Image (tube, coloured by chain):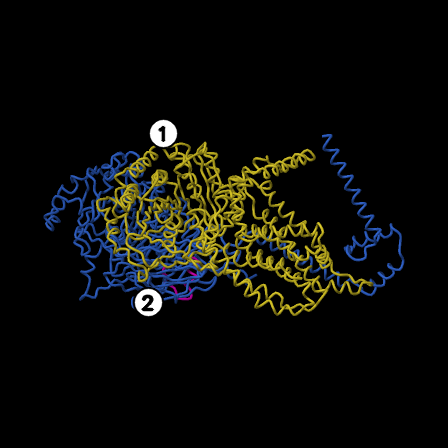
Amino acid sequence: MVLLQRPHILLLLIDTHQFLQCWIAFGSANEEGQQQEEFSEELLVKPLPDHKLLAHFHFQSSAPPSTSNGCHHHLFPKAISQLVQKFRVKEMELSFTQGRWNYESWGGFDPISSSNAKPPGVELWAVFDVPQHHIDASWKNLTHTLSGLFCASINFLESTATYSTPEWSFPPASGNVRYGTLPCEAVCTENLTPWLKLLPCRDKAAIALLLDRPSLYRGFYHSQRLHLTSTESSSEGIDSGIILEQTLTVVLQPNSERAIEVHASEKHVQPSWSLSSIFGKQVSGRCVLAKSSSVYLLLDRGLVAELKFPNKENGKSAANGLTSENFWSNPSFELSVNPDRIFLEESSSHSKSLSILYMFQVEKYSESEPFDIGLMWKVPVAWLCQQTPLHASRFFMGSGNERGAIAISLKSTQFTEGFMSANSKDGSCELRVDVFQVVPWYVKVYFHSLRVFVDQQPRAVSDFIEKIHVSPSKDKMSPGVMEVVLKLPCRVNTAALTIEFDKGFLRIDEYPPDANQGFDIPSAIISFPNFHASMVFLEDDSLNRSPLLSKFQEKCPVMSYTEVLLVPLTTPDFSMPYNVITIKCTVFALYFGSLLNVLQRRVAEEERFLKAKAAKKTGRLPLLLSKLSAKLRGRRREPLHSPPSSSSFINSKLVLKVILVAGLAVGWQYFFS
Amino acid sequence: MAETKEKSLSDEKPKPRVRPIVRLGIFLISHSFLVSIVCCTAGVLALFLLPVLAKNTYISENALMPGSASPMLSNQHVSDGNRLVKDLTNPNSKSSETGIESHKIIAQYMLDLGAEVSFHKFHPQMNQFHPLHFFSSPVSGKIQENYSCSSYGINTVGIIRAPRGDGKEAIVLVTPYNALKSGFGEALSLGIAYSVFSLLTQVTWLAKDIIWLVADSQYGEYAAVAAWLREYQTPKFSSLSTPNAEMCPDVNNLFELKGHSISGSKFSNSFRRAGTMAAALVLKVRDQNEQFEDTISIYAEASNGQMPNLDLINVVNYLAVHRQGLRVNVEKLWPLLNSSWLKSLGEIFESLAKVAKSLYPKWKFGIPATEYVEGTATLASSLYYQALGVPTGPHGAFRDYQVDAITLEISPKFSLDKVWRNDILLRGGRLIEGVIRSVNNLLEKFHQSFFLYLLTSPSKFVSVGVYMIAFALLIAPLPMVAASLYVDANSSSNCSKGDSSTPSAITDTDEHGIAIRSWSPTTSFMIWVLLSILSLLTLNSVLASPLACAKATQEKEWALVKSVTISSVFIGLGLMSVINFATAEIGALLMVPMCLLARPLKLDVRAGTLRSFCRLICNLVLGHIAFPPAAFFLLKGMLDGFGNANVGDFWMWVESLWAWNSATYLFIGMVQLPCWVLCVSILFHTC
């Protein structure tokens, strides 16, 4: 008994100890109090060229990197901090996405698209701060925790066949990264609600109030992302500062009824919109817990170039007259609310024109006077978003259930030609492209069959591939991973990578219920490390705290995801087990029946019996009886040889009689019915 | 089996128990004559019973839900479609020689809807025969060497991306269009497709991308679609081998169209793709019309008798009949409809069914005689087109890539009326919309319903489990007869070896004339016949002589040859039934009676009885019918009248089989002709 009780006592001791620690820590936080937990909310709205509108919600909570908080927080979601502490997560990103990001018309070169355009379904990667051999265990626990937290089947990422370990191509380059995707995960409100629960004001106040479910999910693209970084992680592990960044990116169609557009000229006018018309709600009041809550309107570089602001001609001098009215009293559009501030982008090497950011502060508005901005277009405008240097698309080649090939084709967008030449050093300009591709094990990729085509010419692989890392798949154990660094000449028009594969077979219990749909191959990640998508806005110190803008300033490499592919595998006939069982039973029955038959048999005795039977020619009835008994015993009457003529005669007579009677009966039935 | 039988014969008295299955085999072999007669009659009868046994079609896949949503295609879309038809039939657009103008118009219309548009240039491709590529995709063959800048076609492709879809799957809508000499029907089909397309750019329920392919049919509808599919599925990244079409000035001209457009980014010269194709619909509108009501014809047969999933046909049939009030029509052998013997057969079946029903009210298998005749005509055409192995439309190209596809051909009632045109646009459009919506609902690819079936009417089918019985009955007696012949021949004399080498040597000689291509069909056919006979005779005289020494075996030699013939026919038919069932079925109908009846004419003449005389006549008739050209002419004569039958037709027919890569060609060359030769050699055997 004593021995049994001891662990309980121990646990109790530990518990009280931890509690005390926490309590002490909390107390000390109160004493210090110099670094507070912070929460800020922002919304960025950006018109897109194809008559759509991008809304980017950005919520950021941070817990200070000190011992001050312990396990208690004012604002920071406890679930997340516990998760970080428990699994020693250094950095993690989880995204739920529905729809595809249209890289061609929505751009791929700005910070929003390169960090918020995600592949359909769920994508999760995490960096752990634990020894190598613990990482997989931590990952498994993390997937289960997140699965419970966000009501999604993230726990399917636990099996080693679904996640991979990128070596160096994945941006947070480190050996402790684990990366997994679920391309066919359906995303819906049940994932959004727990995500909103992490916000201090939930969706009850200020900007989060706009998150009206029907209008969100009516959009063309919807990606909800959760990114957390623990800034500092000391050896104790408990006291690390965490920054939690929650973003929701939606692409919406401002006015749904397109039937109004009758005249061809009106067709090209961008639709006018207001926040209330898109989301069906208005921003009323502010979240009192938020440090700042503001709404931004971003006009793209391409759009600004088209709009021709009156002071555009003045060039740089315009930046000085920032506050001048002429930015929103533009002849081509009209804003319903005067912006509080206007930011001009600092000159960038990538483009000649600069983007403009209008800022609106929500704090000024109250419930009686809700905040609602609107944009009215007066003249038709057309512009193009800045695209990635190369447009990537991926597709299958071949047909049939046996083999095929995956092709990744890269096409120059010719948008970035100008600055590519600027980047070139003494004529030998090179464009670096990183390709990261994970394939499930049942698509057995032959890495030796990798072929490179540049400008429609087959080239030697070694000419263009600078670095390659391959980890072949193991059946039912791990997926195949391919990481390639391509060095292409800047003037390249098209490039293509092809790699062949065989389709594998799964065991019958490994098929999902909808096996005939096909199997998904997750998106490949194409990144351009030489190019950085960043927007630096001219700012004063007060702006320094806006997390969204500081996020824009970070230099992150331009990244794009390719399409998810659907590979049809051979599926068995799922009624097959039944057939197999039936056939097996038949075979067994036959086998055992004949075996028993053979074992039972006494040859000598049978012969004696036959002889005896032949000796005494019995009468008609006993013969028939014996025949009947022989039949009952499973023997077959030999119809060919030595049939006694009398019996056959009688037999045929009998048959005739039976047929006659039956025919009579049928005739009778027929005529008298 | 034969050995056991011998043993059983040798020690008769204390009869040891032989295993029942062996005994059954011996019984059947010894009664092979009766068995073969019963089986063959039953097989032919079962074939004629198939229309009676046909079941009603039903939609097997629940996810399809055809007609559960009310159609959204409104008059607005119809007037959009009408606008396109007017622009295309406008004489101004036809001024250009190459028809590029109309392609530009179509592309501009697609762009205005917000779709992604691209042009696909292709060169018509030479056909090549690949003997063993029955169901795999065609190898991207060689492009004609002597092409010129003018000989290329342009497919216009528009793609709508599903707003919230993940782009993994796509539905293809194909409208063949010849810009050079387009009839009004083709323009109308484009109008229907455009009205559907304009609707689909606005709807929110799309889960799969929509590809609209305007296939340039100036080199044939099939060639254009096949070229596009080849580029879609097996693109070539290297341009070394292919001639560079960009050099041609016309093409560059074509790509200049979009500069002014607002959605300029949506147009690209490069080939555009969507995901895996879930299904494809080919839409055509026929120009001439003599039907009494609006009819829609479904063509489904692809190469080598492959059929799309029955669910696709069911959905079209259901929506056309129950929603849009169109009459659905499947190809029929029209001459059969008027044949009196078929009608009387139908009446017999009908009266039999009546009797059966009066005996026991639950037996309801009868169908009216007219329905029976129609069902038989449809079944015969279904069987014929599957056996031919040549696709009946551009949809055949899709089946080579395991995509379910059908061709819908709308034949409107009367024409040249604005109201009427709107009506056909609306109904055709709603039908297409409904089918696309159903396919869009699919979560998995088509797999629930049948792939192996014969249609007896648009809403009735015979599944593989039923129609196989007829074939199985037909070929079942073959091994038994072969075994019994062998046993009989063997029991009398044991020294016959190597007799099979002679006939099999003959089989090699049948395919001589095929390579000759420059003469007219008639002369080349004649040359082929002459060559074959010549080589046959030489080989026979050279190789068959050594056997003449064995005088003792001479009497029974024909029986051994017959046994070999029958077994080779059995093997050939069995193999063919796996590749193309319909071919095997028709082949069995022709060959099985001949093989079973074959007997040296000399013997029958010598016997001189009535029975042998009958057999003689039967043998002569069957020996003529089973010769493939003779069978072809007979069928053609029966269907079209003997007046316009031409000797060259058969040559053309075989050449088309060759060009379309049909397995039937191999069957005729490697099974039917050799076996016919063997049978003829049995008939003229000197014994």
Q: Does the magenta stretch include residue A140?
A: yes
Q: Is mark 2 on a helix, strand or loop?
A: helix
Q: Which of B256 and A244 is in front in this view?
A: B256
Write down the residue under mark 1.
B419
Q: Is residue B621 left or right of residue B100?
A: right
**Residue drawn at the location 86% of the way across and 59% of the way down:** A614
Tell me where residue A189 sits by quadrant. top left
Q: Is residue A324 magenta?
A: no
Question: What is the span of residues highlighted in magenta in the rendered image?
Answer: A126-141
User: Where's residue A450, x and y in %?
Assistant: 37, 65
In the image, residue B505 sits, relative to residue A149, either above or below, namely below
Q: Nearer the viewer, residue B590 or A191?
A: B590
The chain letter of the yellow chain reads B
Which-is-in-front pick, marks 1 and 2?
1
Q: What element carries label 1?
A: helix
In the image, residue A211 sits, relative to residue A424, either above or below, namely above
Could you say which disc has been placed on residue A461 in the image?
2
C-alpha separation, residue under disc 1 versus residue under disc 2: 63 Å
Q: Mark 1 lies on which chain?
A: B
Tell me where residue A190 sits by quadrant. top left
**Residue drawn at the location 52% of the way across and 63% of the way down:** B535
Residue A23 shows in the view: no
In the image, residue B237 sits, relative to residue A208, either above or below, namely below
The chain letter of the blue chain reads A
